[in-house]
């Protein structure tokens, strides 16, 4: 099992460009999450999907959109990238919500110039 | 006030020492408590998990929860250089809710 995979691993964008970060899990988990991690700020939840067909905003949703494509895949889209979105993005999944272990992907390092 | 507070460190201790990492939280509704470990340039991974007050031990690691004072601790005995990482405490209110992470404490174990 690959666990949680993320693509791409690295990306450089110019301000105003758009891109989609892809995430897939092969553990048959119901819940999936997108976080960003910045120095001194810890992990902050952007969006999450408690189950297939549902998505909810987290702590820092502005500037992002998500799609739960199916049970395996959860994508994060930046419609018009800004320098403030320079960060490391992590996708995670868990069997069900908060009482279960979250498994994290390797992260995507995004730089917006 | 952030719901989960954690000293960012860095914390440097000599190899073999006992390490104490701490978190406080503000919402008494939290029921589930976790410690995640994150190595440099990697995703976090679950280290310890508990949903009650008291101690939980796993090898060299002990997680302690004091719900009356809203305090969570992680103790590492016989610390090793391989324990050098960032440790994030995390809490969740209920089974289907999201997890709230602390900012993480960077730990360096000096050989």
Image: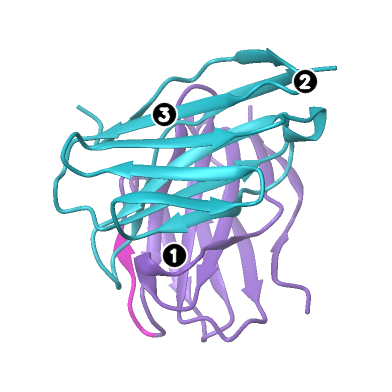
Chain colours: A purple, B cyan
Q: Nearer the viewer, mark 2 or mark 3?
A: 2
Q: Residues within 10 Å of mark 1 (few under 14, many from 20)?
A: many
Q: Secondary structure at mark 1?
A: strand
Residue A66 numbered tag: 1
Quickly name the residue at label 3.
Answer: B22
Label number found at residue B15: 2
CA gap between label 3 and label 1 equals 34 Å
Highlighted range, magenta = A53-57
Tell me the subunit letter for badge 3: B
Query: Residue at left 25%, top 58%?
Result: B31
Q: Tell me, yes or no, whether dots 2 and 3 are on the same chain.
A: yes
Residue at screen point 58% across, 77% down: A73
Report crowding for label 3: few under 14, some 14 to 19, many 20 or more residues within 10 A (C-alpha).
some
The subunit letter for the residue under badge 2 reads B
Is B14 colored magenta in this rendering?
no
Q: Is residue A81 visible?
A: no
**Whole-number angstrom distance, CA of label 2 to CA of label 1:** 44 Å
The residue closer to the viewer here, B101 or A77, is B101
Q: Position of residue A23 (x, y in %)?
A: 62, 67
Quadrant location of residue A28? Answer: bottom right
């Amino acid at each position: 099992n690959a666990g949680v995979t993320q693509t791409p691993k690295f990306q450089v964008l110019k301000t105003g460009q758009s891109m989609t970060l892809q995430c897939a899990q092969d553990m048959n988990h119901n819940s999936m999450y997108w976080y960003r991690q910045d120095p001194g700020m810890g992990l902050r939840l952007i969006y999450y999907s408690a189950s297939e067909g549902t998505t909810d905003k987290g702590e820092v949703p502005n500037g992002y959109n998500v799609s739960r494509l199916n049970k395996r895949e959860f994508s994060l889209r930046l419609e018009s990238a800004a320098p403030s979105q320079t960060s490391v993005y992590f996708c995670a999944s868990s069997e069900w919500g908060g009482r279960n272990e979250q498994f994290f992907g390797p992260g995507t390092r995004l730089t917006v110039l | 006030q952030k719901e989960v507070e954690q000293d960012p460190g860095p914390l440097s201790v000599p190899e073999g020492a006992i390490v104490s990492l701490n978190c406080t939280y503000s919402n008494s509704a939290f029921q589930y408590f976790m410690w995640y470990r994150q190595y440099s340039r990697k995703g976090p991974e679950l280290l310890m998990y508990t949903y009650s007050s008291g101690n939980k031990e796993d090898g060299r690691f002990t997680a302690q929860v004091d719900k009356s004072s809203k305090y969570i601790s992680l103790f590492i005995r016989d610390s090793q250089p391989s324990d050098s990482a960032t440790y994030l405490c995390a809490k969740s209110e209920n089974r289907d809710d999201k997890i709230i992470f602390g900012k993480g404490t960077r730990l360096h174990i000096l050989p």
